[in-house]
Image: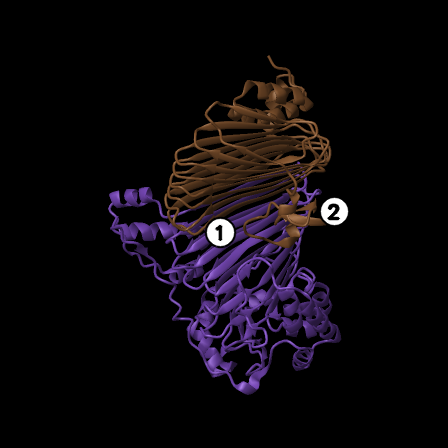
Chain colours: A purple, B brown
Amino acid sequence: MKEKTYVKDIDESIYDFRFKEDEEDILGRGIGADLIDEISKEKNDPEWMRNFRQKSLELFHKQRMPQWGPSIEGLDMDRIVTYIRPKAKMRNKWEDVPEDVKKTFERLGIPQAERESLSGVGAQYDSEIVYHNLRSEVEKQGVVYTDLETAMRNPRFSEMIEKHFMKLVPPTDHKFAALHGAVWSGGSFVYVPEGVKVDIPLQSYFRLNAESAGQFEHTLIIIEKNSYLHFIEGCSAPKYYAASLHAGCVELYIGENATLRYSTIENWSKNMYNLNTKRALVEKGGKVEWISGSFGSHVSYLYPTSVLNGDGAVSEFTGITFSGDGQDLDTGAKVIHNAPNTSSYMNTRSISKSGGRNTFRSEVIVKPQAKGSKSSVSCASLMLDSISGSDTIPVMDIRTKDADIGHEAKIGRISDEAVFYLMSRGLSEEEAKALIVSGFAENVSKELPVEYAVEMNNLIRMEMVGSIG
Amino acid sequence: MNANESTKINILPVPTWNHLNINDVDYVGASSAEEIFEGIKKINIEPSGSNPVIYDFDEDFDGAQITINAKEDSDIIFRFLKSDKDTKVKIKSKINDGTKLSISIVKLSDNERFYVTSDAVVNKDASLSLTTVSLGNKATYLEGKADLTGDASSFDTYTSYILEKDEFLDMNYVADHKGQNTESEIVSAGVLKEGTKKNSRQTINFISGCSGSKGSESEEVLLLDDDVINKSAPLILCTEEDVEGEHGASIGEPDEDTVFYLKSRGLSLEKIHEMLSFAKIETALKRINHEETTKLVHKYLGVEDD
């Protein structure tokens, strides 16, 4: 009898710890106009933002839940905590951060990573950023990296933020974009001036500690002509029985001939509904590189979108999704070719096991004016058992003859021939299968800085046993 | 027909984003899929081994509900030649154990709308080969589904088309792999020019228990003008580990090197486009492998036979 290869679940223990939230810090549950007003007051929003939140709330109530994708019936919006008061103001020294919050980030290795391999770090705990710091030499170059609320109140950036905030992802986009517009809190603002190359990455880490809570951080990054930035985003939460919600929003504005690499390692707990929206606008000759690793969440809807708005703009998306017991992860990417000679590449891998479901969903739209554009989509799925599922749902909408569009998809299991070959070279069957799965995930890990690739590989941490042919 | 009513046909097995308008297509004039075929005459076919059997539909033809019970290897060619009316055809096939059924649909009519939907149950060791040549009609809706119930059953389909002068083509092909060691191949190849629009949906569905199955889907679309719209949704759905599924698509202008070579041999760009277009149809004609049908299609296209 053939014994099945067993792949262990991702080890969540390093993320699954919590500190009790004080009830008085919770501003309220559910979504109502009064609560939105309270959030505005609490955050001392400018007038335009108060109005924006209320209009977004109206849109949220008007819009339908998604009619496609995984079920989100288990998400009870009336129970979700939309805003939790911060325990302390934002600091730029870890010593000044409250002890339990600091301990949380220490256990996640953030201060250490900051010392060793980052230009700057932002740390959000529940609803607000609690720590932000940027290396002085980077700051001297004119780079700004702070929380969005601080930037919004800074006369130098207030106008810029009003001009860009939720213009790429308007609240009309979908129900959870509207929700985000109404209750957003925290997140980061990054500004990179013309010609500045930030060689060492910045990282924001989002930690949701409270039970039945929502996190709605907004990340706004504007990089000017000929600049470069690598931004890393990480996220985690302890596991509770009640559902939690992440409806963040990322808006990236990439100037002419600038490059922005946006890397995400998402490891929310398995009770999380991750309904996040990410979008980039790329000007002439600019480039966005999305690196995406999705490991956590109960349900995910995540499709980073690139709008290639300038001649020669480029989008690259590299992603891996690992879905295990109780997970239904619907991930992928969208590209809109809106200008001539634009290029897009998508390269994704998904692994399904123990009843987990993966869906790769994509769209490539080539507008009539995008002459000379090219697009290539490649997705591969690995099924590790027959109680799991893996779907591939790509769509191409091409409206000019002068385009070169390619698409390929593959689905299958670990090849017996490959295992046989590796065994003939001296590996055990377990080692052979582990090597094949690691190789399958390499498209993402090779794109990450070494420290993060190691973290990702630790996350996957596959233990192969048995498998006697 | 009530022009105020419509029903959704050619439904994608799993929906995606609504804004892409690819989840289904509206068929105007009926409130349900059943209503489309109300009052349409029924034809039962039980092929008896004399191949091919040819059914020509002409003049006043407005449609048929065709039931095929294939117990012997059979080759059926449906030719839709001319009609002034909307044409609606529903084909339901049962392919018994060990039987090979080949269905060819050759559409050369110029009326407003043409809708053909084919649904087959393919039993153990049986196979269905479905070939379609789609030429003419302002709006064409094609659907081909195969339920690969039996072990070692198979389904292969090839659809070829040339769209011109604002024509619209909407396709939906689905292979449901249920039996073990089943195989499917879904291919479409065609040409879009002169303001035409085309939607293509291809789905390979590996259902738990279909171990050892293989499926592939592919699409080649030549875009010859700038005012055309091509939409493609090639799906692979999978709840079985031991399967192999793949998809490939190539969409765009004719390959530069090919065009350069043919130009160097003295051909005009117009002639080159015509040749590349006809090549898509020729592949389908070779599969049909019926001389008279080939001549009929060539005549429609204005191609001279040797």
Question: What is the x, y in percent for residue A459?
Answer: 40, 62
Q: Residue A187 falls in which quadrant of the image? A: bottom right
Q: In the rendered image, is residue A43 in sight?
A: yes
Which residue bears the numbered disc 2? Answer: B2
Q: Residues within 10 Å of mark 2 (few under 14, many from 20)?
A: few
Q: Nearer the viewer, residue A402 or B27?
A: B27
Image: B268 above or below B237: above
Cα–Cα span, label 2 and label 1: 38 Å
Q: Chain of mark 1?
A: A
Residue B56 image position (x, y, % from top left): 61, 26
Residue sitting at the far top:
B306
Report which quarter residue A54 is drawn in. bottom right
Q: Quadrant of residue A104?
A: bottom left
Q: According to the image, label 1 marks what residue?
A: A391
Q: Is residue A164 left or right of residue A75?
A: right
Report the mark closest to the observer, 2 or 1: 2
Q: What is the x, y in percent for residue A289?
A: 56, 53
The amino acid marked with disc number 2 is Asn
Q: Mark 1, residues whose alpha carbon is within 10 Å: few (<14), some, or many (≥20)?
A: many
Q: Is residue A427 left or right of residue A124?
A: left
Tell me what residue is drawn at x 42 percent, y 54 percent.
A351
Residue A289 in sight here? no
Viewer-proximal residue, B273 or B96?
Answer: B96
Host chain of mark 2: B
Total numbered labels placed on residues in the image:
2
Mark linked to residue A84: none
The local secondary structure at tag 2 comes to strand
Place of residue B135 in the rendered image (x, y in percent of width and height, measured from the top left): 65, 29
Residue at (56% x, 51% y) in the render: A362
Of residues A267 and B93, which is closer to you in this image?
B93
Q: Amino acid at mark 1?
A: Asp
Q: What kind of element bears circle 1?
A: strand
